[in-house]
Image (tube, rainbow, N blue to C red):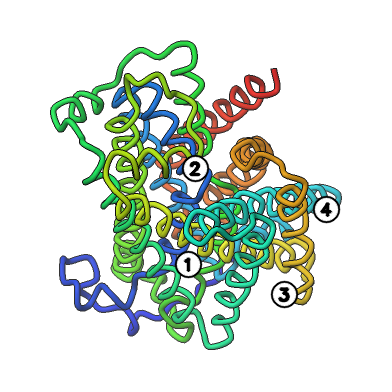
């Protein structure tokens, strides 16, 4: 049944116009989701791509973010149009055994997500303050838990803090770009698609295939229901739907533009620092050291601070996604402290036994890759059904594009997994 929990009176008629003062209150959900696009795993992947092949793969970063815009638009629209998140829809529309299977894989994905974020935060604390990696992992988990506690005061405080972290990430990595010695002309040439083979193809697959993380597909659909109120059904009129969709598209477009700029900055900075030096396999520590040697202590510190903000914010969003998944699939909740303990334990355990942080990041991305089709396929299926979406149903062109994106992202992730396991 079509449900709508949106309030036309809460959305100014000028939402689609370029009036920042009126647009600002409507932004937020996509900026929370965008944190997943600038998490420590992305930092490692883009840095390696830039160090290995210079600016050649910059066009892949741009293409990946174009795909992300479509996916995040669909998941936001699902929540806004129906008042329910993706996990809840799966529970209502699919057989119980399938729902249980989806929940199990989603929980595994949540653990892999937390592993990447906790490791990134721990490395950042070690770089900044010399904190031992296991202790840094625990501190990152504690801060992320505190951030989630802000939700007791409504969605706005949490969104504002996470958006603030996103801005810190953008400024930090932006300063990294300034100090890296970039060749603007060569950077522009990297925007032109070029043939890929060998290791370049693998890295391109890693950038494209790992762009859409399954947990943000679930969590974004849970952030938009009731966003503009729940007393007046704005979606009953074409004009009302158009205004709501414009606001949501501004939210997604601006958030993905910022995330894409950060990822491009990471690749470009690594290209400026390491391309042609023979140092093709980069770790978070080596990028930090390279910045310090080339651009000075301030640039290295900016990188570490941005990485720390990335770990803190992404870990809190990942844990929130775990809560959304359990509530949606099973209609159950567990105490936040218990969930944090379960998802953090593997990451802290790996750090305690001295595992290589960069290797842990890579393998966490492999696990995340398995979860992508289990999120994207139901999303496209649901948003294409009029019985679910009502008048918000996708146009056939949107569904065709979404099917193509799902096939490409799923196929590339499968290719990446096979390459890494082989």
| Precedes in sequence: disc 2 or disc 4 | 4
Which residue is painted at 79% across and 65% down in the image?
A: 330
C-alpha distance separating marks 3 and 4: 21 Å
Q: Determine if residue 88 is in view.
A: no
Name the residue nearer the viewer: 205 or 183: 183
Dots 2 and 3: beta carbons under 8 Å?
Answer: no
Q: Which residue is mark 1?
A: 80
Closer to us: mark 2 or mark 3? Answer: 2
Which residue is nearer to you in this view: 20 or 228?
Answer: 20
Q: Give residue 100's mark.
A: 4
Residue 336 is marked as 3
Viewer-side label of 1, 3: 3
Which residue lies at the image location 64% right of the left edge and 64% below the top edge? Answer: 319
| Extreme residue in the left direction | 185
Residue 51 place in picture, x, y as percent: 38, 27
* Outermost residue, right side: 97
Q: Residue 318 placed where, x, y %?
A: 60, 60
**Residue 174 in view:** yes
Residue drawn at (48%, 83%) of the image: 230
Question: Is label 3 in a helix, a strand or a loop?
Answer: helix
Question: Residue 58: where, in percent of width, then height?
Answer: 31, 30
Reading the image, the residue beneath label 2 is 285
- Please report whichever mark, 1 or 2, sits nearer to the chain's N-terminal start: 1
Classify 10 Å Cα crowding around label 3: few (below 14), some (14-19), many (20 and above): some
Q: Residues within 10 Å of mark 1 (few under 14, many from 20)?
A: many
For this view, does 386 lie left or right of residue 346? left
SS for dot 1: helix
């Amino acid at each position: 049944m079509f449900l709508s929990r949106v309030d036309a009176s809460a959305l100014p008629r000028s939402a689609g116009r370029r009036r920042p003062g009126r647009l600002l209150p409507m932004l937020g959900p996509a900026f929370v989701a965008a944190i997943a696009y600038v998490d420590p795993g992305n930092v490692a992947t883009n840095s390696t791509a830039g160090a290995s092949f210079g600016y050649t793969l910059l066009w892949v970063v741009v293409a990946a973010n174009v795909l992300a815009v479509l996916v995040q638009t669909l998941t936001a629209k699902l929540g806004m149009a129906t008042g329910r998140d993706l996990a809840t829809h799966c529970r209502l529309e699919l057989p119980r055994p399938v729902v249980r299977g989806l929940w199990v894989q989603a929980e595994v994905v949540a653990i892999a997500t937390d592993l990447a974020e906790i490791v990134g935060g721990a490395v950042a604390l070690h770089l900044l303050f010399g904190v031992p990696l296991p202790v840094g992992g625990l501190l990152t988990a504690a801060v992320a838990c505190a951030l989630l506690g802000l939700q007791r005061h409504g969605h706005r405080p949490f969104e504002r803090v996470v958006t603030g972290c996103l801005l810190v990430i953008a400024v930090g990595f932006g300063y990294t770009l300034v100090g890296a010695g970039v060749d603007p002309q060569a950077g522009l040439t990297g925007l032109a698609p070029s043939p890929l083979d060998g290791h370049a193809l693998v890295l391109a697959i890693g950038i494209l295939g790992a762009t859409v993380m399954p947990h943000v597909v679930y969590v974004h659909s849970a952030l938009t229901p009731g966003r503009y109120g729940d007393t007046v059904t704005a979606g009953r009129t074409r004009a009302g739907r158009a205004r709501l969709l414009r606001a949501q598209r501004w939210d997604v477009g601006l958030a993905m533009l910022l995330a894409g700029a950060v990822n491009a900055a990471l690749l470009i900075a690594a290209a400026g620092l390491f391309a042609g030096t023979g140092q093709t396999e980069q770790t978070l520590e080596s990028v930090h050291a390279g910045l310090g040697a080339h651009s000075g202590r301030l640039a290295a510190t900016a990188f570490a601070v941005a990485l720390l903000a990335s770990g803190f914010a992404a870990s809190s969003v990942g844990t929130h996604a775990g809560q959304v998944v359990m509530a949606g699939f099973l209609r159950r909740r567990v105490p936040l402290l218990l969930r944090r303990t379960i998802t953090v334990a593997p990451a802290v355990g790996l750090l305690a036994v001295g595992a290589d942080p960069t290797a842990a990041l890579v393998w966490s991305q492999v696990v995340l890759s398995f979860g992508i089709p289990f999120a994207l396929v139901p999303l496209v299926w649901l948003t294409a059904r009029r019985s679910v979406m009502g008048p918000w149903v996708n146009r056939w062109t949107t569904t065709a594009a979404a099917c193509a994106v799902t096939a490409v992202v799923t196929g590339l992730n499968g290719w990446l997994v096979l390459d890494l396991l082989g």
